[in-house]
Amino acid sequence: MNSEYHNNFQSVQAAAGEKLGRSVQKSLFDRLEWIKGLHQLCLPNREPLIVHCEDDDTSAWIFLVKNGLGRYSALANWYNFTYRPIFSGDYDEVTKLALLARLAKKLSKYAHSIEITPMPDEDASANLTERAFEQAGWVVFRSKVDDNHILNVKGRTFDQYWGDRPGQLRNTVRRKAKKNLVSVRIEKEFSEDDWNDYNSVYQRSWKPEEGNPEFLRHVAQREALAGCMRLGLAYIDGEPVAAQFWTVENGEALIHKLAHVEHATKSSPGTLLSVAMFQHVIDVDHVDMIDFGTGNDPYKREWMEDVRERYRLELYWPNHPLAWLPILRHYASGLVGGPRSD
């Protein structure tokens, strides 16, 4: 079983080949192109720490960035729906656990403190990572940090899904659609004009300033080339007033960004655009699930039916003196409850 350390993406690409590419990694957030772009455009001043381990044809990867002396965190930010160790090859849970434990042991040479978030657990990622680091000797604290709202389509048509929505939402759409003020379109191909309209809406919306528009633009371009982008735009009298950026792949639709301009709120362009987007991905793309990302915005409950939790793992290497105080603070707070006992 071999393990390697990397501090640049050139060596990662050479070692990974296609193992971290679209053909192998089904999740957008597990691909090297996503991680590399995120580092280059959003976290350029944060030194990367990348460790991978191989056993025959199976490999595991962890991508981190440096926060300070011996302190690291996940190479992720608010654009990520999830973050987790990445695997490729023919593996089962036992193999994954062994590979991760090996990675965790190697990381103790570089780090005394690691924070990983937002971790899913519907695929046992959080649980497996927790167990592996504990097996390697780390002290692990786990806490819930967010919720992920999703819709399991369950074979329904859009009309069947729409019939299950709250009456107030359906009435709003019926009334606003009758006025015929808002026109919508959904684009699969990237164009500068469309992206400028998207940016125009976002800049005039209630949303905070976009963290890194160039990163999102690169994602949109790349996903459009792969046939996965869905860019929804709504207009009133030719003015862009609502915009949504989704991606669709492997039976899942991800809602990355949505916004509308305040002065058009009375016409509900954002809601009407959402109807068009949901109808398209359900009836045209035939997705099995729609993922609204993280956050507990009240409007998400009108559109979604299920909630999954997202977690933070705080990992401390107990043989390093700088880890002792935060470990003691966690125990003393009583808020997290300490490491696993099973």
Image (spheres, helix red, strand yellow):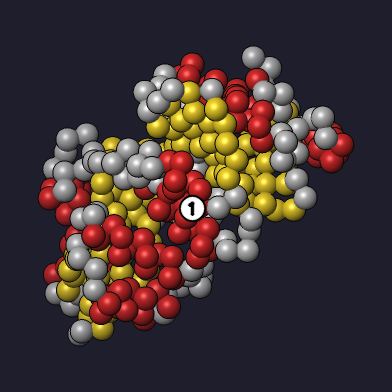
Q: For the residue labelled by badge 1, is the local secondary structure a helix, a strand or a loop?
A: helix
Q: Is residue 278 left or right of residue 92?
A: left
* Camera-side residue of 286 and 215: 215
Q: Residues within 10 Å of mark 1 (few under 14, many from 20)?
A: few
Quarter of image, res 187: bottom left
Quarter of image, res 230: bottom left
Q: Position of residue 40 (x, y in %)?
A: 51, 62
Res. 128 visible in picture: no
Q: Position of residue 288 (x, y in %)?
A: 23, 38
Q: Amino acid at mark 1?
A: Gln
Q: Position of residue 287 (x, y in %)?
A: 21, 43
Q: Is residue 101 left or right of residue 338?
A: left
Q: Is residue 53 left or right of residue 13?
A: right
Quadrant the C terminus occupies: top right
Q: Is residue 280 above or below residue 152?
A: below
Q: How many tags in the picture?
A: 1
Quadrant the N terminus occupies: top right
* Camera-side residue of 62 and 203: 62
Res. 318 visible in picture: yes
Q: Is residue 258 above or below residue 197?
A: above
Q: Position of residue 68 (x, y in %)?
A: 74, 53
Q: Is residue 272 above or below residue 90?
A: below
* Camera-side residue of 289 and 39: 39
**To which residue does mark 1 refer?**
10
Q: Residue at x 42, y 19 (%)?
A: 92
Q: Residue at x 51, y 73 (%)?
A: 209
Q: Residue at x 16, y 38 (%)?
A: 156
Q: Residue at x 37, y 28 (%)?
A: 89
